[in-house]
Amino acid sequence: MRLGSANTYDRALQNLYSRQTELSNQQEKLTSGKNVNRPSDDPTGAAQAERALTRLARISSDNRSLEVQRSAITLAESTLGDATSLVQKLRELVITAGNAGYSASDRKSVAQEMSGLRDQLFALANARDANGTPLFGALGSASAPFTDSSGGVSFNGVAGQRASTETSIPGTMDGQAVWMNVASGNGSFALSTGTGNTGNLWTNTGQVLTPASLTGHNYTITFSVVGAATTYSVQDTTNIPATTVLPAPAVPPSPNPTYTPGQAITFDGLSLVANGAPANGDTVQVVPSTTTNLFKVMDDAITAIGDPNLTSSQRAQAVGLALTQVDTGMNQLQAARSQAGEWMNRADNIQDAQEGRTLQLSADKSRAEELDMVKGISDFTRFQTGYQTALQSYAQVQKLSLFNFIS
């Protein structure tokens, strides 16, 4: 086999270039601390690192959104706490206004103070976060979800509540559910004395004794006064024609029950207590509860307390109804505050989970692209030795000339 000196020279030079490239690449890896500096270094590792990097960027974006949402819900929770305090103060004023020793001017002063609290509460309902987004805007985008007009407070937003996801919580609360959906009466039925009553009659707000027996019908309780005896009867006015509930139908007909102030009147699963001295023909209306709003409850209470023309019985009825409905509205605010607190806890859990995902993805990215420094230094030493060997080989090949052997 014959080998030319030119071929040997080319091979030695190519080996030198190859060793030099290996050493240079390894030196670059040591300097950057990465095993993959460009996709051509390791296409599979580069793809894995890029995938992890994309997911890390998505988590970072989700975390920024979560912080905005958490800030808004934290402010909403604080606002609901302030609102609950205002409603509690208003409730105390309602109780104060029921004092029989108060004069008309005293009650007017109480009504004015209640009106100020009501205006503060309305301002809280339209509160916004640092970005100018209403805290209780629900699904709508109105700059002021609530408006106050001569017809009362109305909700301008789109009712509904955004749902939480694995990486987010709602950024606003449903103002319709928080402030507007307050049940009238005791939540099951509402009582009112007839507008044509001439006696001194009032009732409490009533209670449900047997939920399964409730019919959801309208009833009229009519009082009859004959001499010193006062009786009453109850008719179901939803039925056409109206049917008698009390006294219970019997043959022969039963006498009407006797009215005793403070004694419960019970029928069809509900109970109420009437007080005072009704006149002949006075009535009490019983209707199913409807939906009102917290501001309407306050407006009605303020109007009733500040009205000097109401009789003591009408005022007592208005105060009792206001207390019951204010308590219902306060419970609704407290429930909404609890929901906000649950979302804040959920945000903490989401953040913890995202931190765990970040650590995992960072580890995956590190394994895919970062250099094992111990192995890197070992490889660098090996490549350096190979490069020095190639240099020495090239130097020896350069001496392979015929003139070196001609004396």
Image: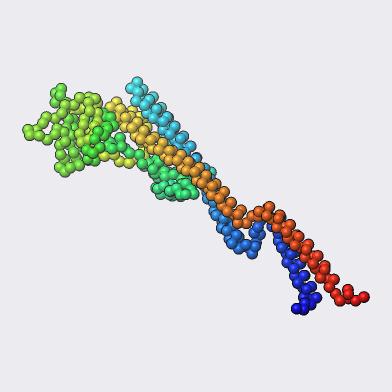
Q: Position of residue 254 (x, y in %)?
A: 10, 31
Name the residue at 60% across, 56% down: 368
Name the residue at 62% across, 62% down: 42
Q: Position of residue 95 (x, y in %)?
A: 36, 26
Q: Position of residue 27 (x, y in %)?
A: 72, 58
Residue 316 sits above or below residue 76 on the image = above
Is 99 situated left or right of 84 in this image? left
Tell me the quarter of the picture where residue 150 sits.
top left
**Closest to the observer, 146 or 30:** 30
**Closest to the observer, 354 or 172:** 354
**Closest to the observer, 111 or 324:** 324
Residue 37 sits above or below residue 285 on the image = below
Tell me the quarter of the picture where residue 197 sits.
top left
Q: Residue furthest front?
A: 1
Query: Where the C terminus falls, by quadrant?
Result: bottom right
Q: Is residue 402 visible?
A: yes
Is 244 situated left or right of 353 in this image? left
Is 189 situated left or right of 401 in this image? left
Residue 14 sits above or below residue 44 on the image = below
Name the residue at 74% across, 68% down: 15
